[in-house]
Image: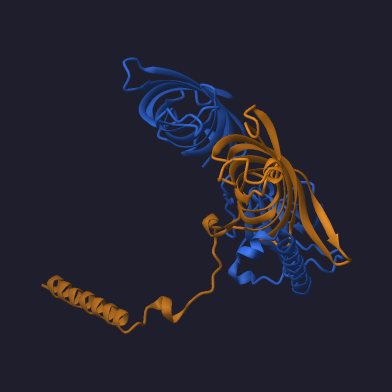
Chain colours: A orange, B blue
Amino acid sequence: MDRRIQYIFLALLLGLSNSYAIAADENGNDPSEIFEPKIERQQVDEALVDDEDFEIGLVFGTLGIEDFGAAELYGVRFNYFINEDFFLQISAGSAKAGLSSAEQLFPGNVVVSNDKDFQFYDLNLGWNILPGEAFWGEDVAVNTSFYLVVGAGNTSFLDNKEFTLTYGAGYRALLNDWLAFSVDTRNHRFNSEYPVGEIKSTHNLEFSFSVSAFF
Amino acid sequence: MDKWFSNGVKLTPVILLGLCWLSLSVAASDATSDANPAFVKQSDSQNTSERDRDALQSVVVAEPFVNLYTGPGVGYPVFHVVEKGEFLWLVKRKYNWFLVVSKDGKEGWVPLLDMQKTKNHDGSDVTFATFNERDFTARSFEVGVKVGDFEGANLIAVSGSWQWTPNLAAELVVGQGLGDFSEVRQTTIAMLNSPWPEWQYSPYFGVGTGIVKVFPSAALVQEIDRKDEAVFVAAGIKRYVSDRFLLRMEYRKYAILTSQPTNEEIEEWTVGFNIFF
């Protein structure tokens, strides 16, 4: 009998404590809200560390189009840094070609093509061959890199698409830890049948500046 | 607008001036705020950080010391040393380098190998993703570029693949071939099997199918565009280089399923590099 009474009391107590606990929850007196310990995270969560392996930039400069004079060049460039030494680069750009020498000599008599938009894309491998620092006066040093790029791509010009080899060198200065300024020189080399139908190799030299952001 | 763009003489100085101003103003603002590691100060009293360390995660140095470099590369000078037992607050990671802030506010770069020797607050080992040859065999994705020869046309292609098991992978390739008389575009999928993934030069074999489109060059008016299905067999070799980087060489033999009585056979050789994740 005693046991039974004990059970009943215990059951009642249990029920009460539960309902108190529920009531406490409803009142917002959650223990964790009363006391918020300022404990630092015990283990580093790598996902919370910001990764910056990509660079995207706008390019402008001059493109010397063989036999068509020099033209302004606009483009975009995307880099993925594999490590401190190497990066992959996708670059694309466009320039509007001027008149060829034949067109200038015989205006109206030479039909070349109406497609004077020199458009290209290329995939390159870049090598930061000489990383370093450059100094601005006494107080400021910027991280820099002299790099080489080599790659291949496609050039669309004069109604033709030509397989194009690209190679060149550039210099990048990091203005801060996410913004960079670069100067690039590179050759876009492809075979063309212009002007006399004979296949010859053309060299189109690019000199460009770019402003880019790391992310 | 058009006048401006057509006149190179006018626009280029404007852009150059703008750039100079931009770089100068960024340099000046950073020089004054001194919040930036890229602008490493010459004197030792500087090179400090104004970052809010409460917002950053930290680790404890467990080796006798850790070097802080001025830039993310082994060639950059070491300008500060953090001793055993001190905290390093993590700002960001750039490939295999970490930008960290020390207790006394120095901001510099630490290589991944050194970061892996630090400890968590509870004394456990810190784990950071690494990319080495062992990770290569456990990779799950690859993206890459390749160039080569597609029956006389110069081919440029990008590829992406999913490693299903250590041996089996599914790969998608989109390519453009530029020949003297035509342009070829190919989109293919393949199932690749590498029987010995742990080998240094790991060979692989595969079969696949796809679409090959041929656009004759503008000069050849009598030709018309063609779009054909193709099946192919492939064989190649992959070689791990370093980090997330591998080289590959591949041969493919296509049977182009043309509408003509006979099918066309085409050989393709490519070399390229892939990055794995």
Q: Residue at coordinates 53% horizontally, 57% vertically from top-left?
A: A45
Image quadrant assignment for residue A169: top right
Q: Compare residues A145 and A40 and report the one nearer the observer.
A: A145
Please provide percent x and percent y for residue B164: 40, 34
Count the marks: 0
Picture layout, residue B270 above or below residue B35? above
* Relative depth, front residue between A193 and B106: A193
Q: Visible in this render: residue B37?
A: no
- Quarter of the picture holding the C terminus of chain A: bottom right
State left or right for residue B18 relative to residue B93. Answer: right
Q: Position of residue A136 (x, y in %)?
A: 85, 63
Does residue B231 lie above or below A29 as drawn? Answer: above
In percent of width and height, residue B159 lies at 49, 36
Q: Position of residue B23 (x, y in %)?
A: 75, 65
B263 vs A177: above or below: above
Residue B53 seen from this side? yes
Side (left or right) of B229 relative to B72: left
Query: Toward the viewer: B120 or A91?
Result: A91
Question: Farthest residue in the right direction?
Answer: A138
Name the residue located 70 percent from the left edge and 72 percent from the top edge: B50
Q: Residue at x 79, y 47 (%)?
A: B75
Q: Of all residues shown, which one is farthest toward the top?
A: B262
Asked whether, in this view, residue B210 is left or right of residue B93, the answer is: left
Looking at the image, which residue sits at the far bottom? A27
Using residue B226 as the reference point, say whether residue B217 is left or right of it.
right
Q: Quadrant of the N terminus of chain A?
A: bottom left
